[in-house]
Amino acid sequence: MASYGLLDLLSLNIPQLCRWAGCFCLLLLLSQAYKLYLKRKELINQLRQFPGPKTHWLYGNAHEFRQDGKDLDLVAGYAEKYTYAYPMWLGNFFASLIICHPDYAKTILSRQDPKDDFAYYFITPWIGKGLLVLSGQKWFQHRRLLTPGFHYDVLKPYVRLMSDCTKVMLDKWDRLVSDQKPVELFHHVSLMTLDTIMKCAFSYQSNCQHNSENAYIKAVYELSYLVDHRFRCFPYHNDLIFYFSPHGFRFRRALKVAHQHTDEVIKRRKESLKHDKELEKIKQKRHLDFLDILLCARDEHGQGLSDEDLRAEVDTFMFEGHDTTASGISWILYCMAKYPEHQKKCREEIHEVMGDRDTVEWEDLGKLTYTTYCIKESLRLYPPVPGVARKLSQPITFCDGRSLPKGAIVLLSIYCMNRSSSIWKNPEVFDPLRFSPENSSERHSHAFLPFSAGSRNCIGQNFAMNEMKVAAALTLKRFQLTPDPANEPLKVPQLVLRSVNGVHLYLKKVE
């Protein structure tokens, strides 16, 4: 067969070259279209055993989600109709099985399946390949190295630091009370939880609560929005399209701010170690912080974390340690405002435990029984992480005999399970006594999963619960909370549970 050289190609006329180029482009498009056809066919085959809501011929179910505060109620409504699980389509070429029953959840969480490589792929440029997204042997290694950072002896001294950071926030609110206007809490709480995580986990004095225009907080908000937006916008699933889009530019700009913040934290600690030659002193400290443990961690071969792994774990913990907790605290305070009879009971308990003290002690945490019930009930109605996703590494068969093949993506909807009438009596009612020992004893082990479950459960759940108790106790001791009826929060899942319009409450000093 004759082949064309450069001179032969140059000798061809322009129309011939155009026809060749057109044929090549057409073949390329047909090839891509055929791949998409096969992908859709595979997804349909995977989910054929699971009935679900009707889909649009182009958008799937994506057009139903408008980020107007009703999205989660929509999926919860579907969960009532399709009790165990149902498929959800975003366009024609991505679908996942929404899990909304504890029997299915237990089956999923008892395995070692990795996080899915779709939604989590979009967040990886931000938090790197840390504990949240790792899988396999490397995940196991990191989990083992980091577990000492959440030991009782490490967490105990953090309670006073949490109290100090919360009091800074409450002092700011003291100055806002006189305005007789509602206060938007979420922003203030985010600054407080960032301040807390910086002091507790990294021994870093950020002063972020006094800098209300904190660049890192703004970057986190921007990144959360853009990751969620990219997930919902099909063209942005393509890396090249996203890179050259305005949203891609915003993402890279926010990413630079977030990573500079992380790099500064690590750099300061490394310089301190180098200058003061105090690595051995740190190893001998009774109370190590999270960064101490990261820097000193060694595996069985004496190898520590690489610079890339170190940064990924710091970014992961920086995000998870403040953003999820900020969500939890904000919704807890909203529930206290919305249900004044429970707010009153909590305040009475807090006064009984703390007396005149304005700092929470470690020993106080276990005595705040009713307050803890209220926190758990708020986490049920407003889970900071509404869902977690997995990609099946092996085929799976559920309790009712239905199955999924290897490679299928499942989304465990914590929000749906928490509001399911098949699991909870009167699920929309705020009833803290659901979590009393006698009422919890017969409940399904996987009915309430604010921190997930199984081997991949949240490593920082005790840290988070302690901080929520401290913030709730000190806030209720100082302020009476009432809702702003003109500005009810509109729930929206953006990596964590936020409100489209913020969380606005009226504050009144407790006499």
Image (cartoon, grey):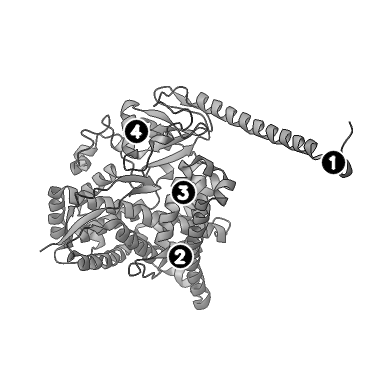
* Structural distance between the alpha carbons of marks 3 and 2: 30 Å
447 or 288: which is nearer to us? 447
Residue of label 3: 227
Q: Nearer the viewer, mark 4 or mark 1?
A: 1
Identify the amino acid type marked 4. Pro
Q: Regarding mark 3 in the picture, which secondary structure is present there?
A: helix
Describe residue 500's horizontal placement relative to residue 245 as left or right.
Answer: left
Q: Is residue 324 above or below residue 31?
A: below
Task: Write down the quadrant of residue 473 in the picture.
Answer: bottom left
* Structural distance between the alpha carbons of marks 2 and 1: 65 Å
Residue of label 2: 292
431 or 55: which is nearer to us? 55
* Structural distance between the alpha carbons of marks 4 and 1: 65 Å
Question: How packed is label 2: few (under 14 Cα within 10 Å), some, or many (20 or more)?
Answer: many
Q: Position of residue 245 (x, y in %)?
A: 54, 50
Identify the amino acid type marked 2. Asp
Q: Position of residue 395 (x, y in %)?
A: 51, 29
Residue of label 4: 102
